[in-house]
Amino acid sequence: MKVGISGIAGRMGREIFYCALEKGINVCFGIESEAFKGFTARRIFPTLERDFPIITSPEEFENYVGPFPDVIIDFSVRGAIIPYIDKICQKGLKLGLVIGTTGFSPDEIDQLKNFSENIPILLSYNMSRGINMLLKILPEIKKSIPDFDIEIVEVHHRMKKDSPSGTAVKLSEVLSSPDTKRITGRDGIVGPRQKNELGIFAVRGGDVIGEHIVFFLGDGERIEIRHSATSRKVFADGAIYAAQFIYDKLKKVGKGFFSSIF
């Protein structure tokens, strides 16, 4: 499997690159903003033995003649990868996408789903295998104890800009029914908790990489399911795992939209 990394100069992009290097995976190119125009990988990773290009616009990508990856892993900024996917589909390239970038609008997600009619795309708010497993099992727990109240608390470092986290939102989505009222705070005299409420609460401080706690609260008992990320490498490992998942989908079905690696 060969990969390309979108957002390669960012914190997660670098982690994914080193993880790919460690696993012997060939990186064909990186994708970055216009600020990196004219760069090659050695400008970002000075000790790199094998150099490769950094692409900084969809037009550059359209004219790229080097080896293409099997999968592009995107950890850039919201929407930045969409023009590249458009070029991929226009050129009829057979490669898959793993997208870990968050904050897409409903219209942008619809665009990704349209693109997935031609190529396989995985969009996940959290690349850790632990969170992906929770997304699979939490609905089963809810089904077994439907009368329990559900609340979510997420904890992240002080520099995180969005709230609640994309992961917390995704957890709430798999635990919601059509009549669920998701709330992100309680203040003042709000009255008793409504039966269909699902609260999501954000804590910010320190250098916490990421922690999510799902509470199932019954009368006289409660269940707490906690996931803690203690290293960003877990997300890089998960992104490579997801790339392998999409690579398999590319070979078997060639298209599809996925939200979990399980």
Image (cartoon, rainbow, N blue to C red):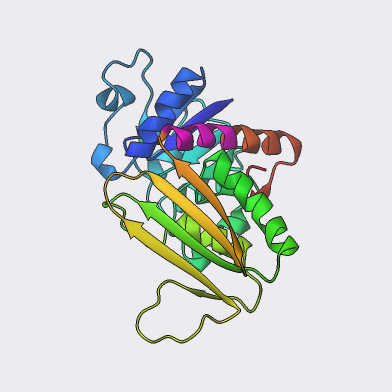
Q: Is residue 15 left or right of residue 183?
A: left
Q: Residue at x 45, y 25 (%)?
A: 19
Magenta: main secondary structure? helix
Q: Position of residue 43 (x, y in %)?
A: 25, 25
The answer to which of 135 and 108 lies nearer the viewer is: 135
Determine if the magenta segment contains residue 35.
Answer: no
Tell me which segment is drawn in magenta: 233-242
As drawn, 129 above or below 162: above
The x, y position of residue 130, in whole percent, is: 57, 41
Q: Quadrant of the C terminus?
A: top right
Q: Residue at x 40, y 73 (%)?
A: 185
User: Can you give x and y, in whole percent of width and height, for residue 47 in the image?
Assistant: 28, 15
**Residue 78 in sight from this viewpoint:** no
Seen at 67% across and 50% down, the residue is 136
- Residue 211 seen in the figure: yes
Residue 151 against residue 87 in the figure, above or below: below
Which residue is at 48% across, 46% downward? Answer: 100
Is residue 96 found left or right of 27 in the rendered image?
right
Q: Is residue 9 left or right of residue 172?
A: left
**Quarter of the figure that contains the N terminus:** top right
